Image: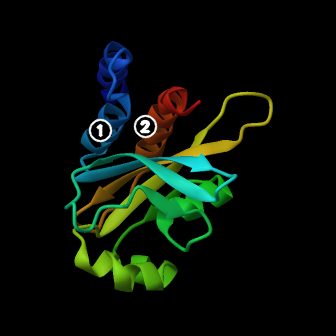
């Protein structure tokens, strides 16, 4: 199973200073995506702080901070605490029209899956977001979401 190999890689990397970048690259690799985003929620400042970006063109990559209240995929997941799957450009443009027009149509992303990174405890809280982008239409499966959620559980240790 693909999660076993990835878990071993992530555990071996847990001593690395660039763990966030490893999380993003392994997430993209596990799902066959070209890019990944990993960000931490800062509720006080109402932003997502970008911890790592993998595979995106630097000209279209997320800046150091994203507006937590913005209508963009990562912010949406941070606010709702639920996974988000977009299967293609038509859905992308319909759900996030402003973001599609400003960024999406100019980027390689055509489909994506994002999951919340949750703090452990009795009342899980969203402390971050992990997402993978695809360069073609793609329906993420329940297994894809489960794999990304498993990586997100591990990634939560890098945020706290």
Query: Residue 82's spot in the image, x, y percent?
Result: 62, 54
- Please state which of residues 24 and 87 is positioned toward the viewer in this rendering: 24
Q: Is residue 144 above or below residue 106?
A: above
Q: Residues within 10 Å of mark 2 (few under 14, many from 20)?
A: some
Identify the residue at the far front of this view: 45
Please identify the quarter of the rendering in which residue 15 is found. top left
Distance CA(mark 2)–CA(mark 1)? 8 Å
> Is residue 19 among the parts visible in the rendering?
yes
Query: Residue 57's spot in the image, x, y percent?
Result: 19, 61
- Please state which of residues 53 and 122 is positioned toward the viewer in this rendering: 53
Q: SS class of the residue under badge 1?
A: helix
Total labels drawn: 2
Locate the C terminus by quadrant: top right
Q: Disc 2, disc 1: CB below 8 Å? A: yes
- Which residue is denoted by mark 2 in the rendering? 147
Residue drawn at x 68%, y 52% is 43
Q: Is residue 153 above or below residue 91?
A: above
Query: Residue 92's spot in the image, x, y percent?
Result: 41, 76
Q: Is residue 148 above or below residue 114?
A: above
Q: Is residue 38 above or below residue 48?
A: above
- Please state which of residues 143 and 135 is positioned toward the viewer in this rendering: 135
Q: Residues within 10 Å of mark 1 (few under 14, many from 20)?
A: some
> Is residue 90 among the parts visible in the rendering?
no
Disc marking residue 30: 1
Q: SS class of the residue under badge 2?
A: helix
Residue drawn at x 72%, y 37% is 124
Query: Residue 54's spot in the image, x, y percent?
Result: 26, 47
């Amino acid at each position: 199973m693909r999660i076993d190999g990835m878990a071993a890689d992530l555990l071996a990397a847990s001593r690395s200073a660039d763990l966030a970048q490893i999380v993003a690259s392994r997430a993209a690799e596990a799902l066959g995506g070209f890019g990944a985003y990993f960000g931490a929620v800062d509720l006080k400042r109402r932003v997502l702080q970008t911890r790592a970006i993998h595979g995106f063109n630097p000209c279209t990559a997320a800046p150091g901070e994203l507006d937590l209240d913005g209508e963009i995929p990562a912010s949406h997941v941070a606010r709702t605490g639920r996974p988000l799957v977009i299967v293609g450009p038509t859905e992308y443009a319909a759900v996030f029209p402003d973001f599609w027009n400003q960024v999406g149509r100019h980027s390689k992303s055509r489909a994506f899956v994002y999951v919340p990174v949750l703090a452990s405890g009795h009342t899980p809280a969203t402390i971050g977001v992990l997402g993978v982008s695809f360069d073609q239409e793609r329906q993420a499966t329940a297994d894809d979401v489960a794999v990304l959620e498993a990586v997100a559980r591990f990634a939560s240790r890098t945020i706290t």
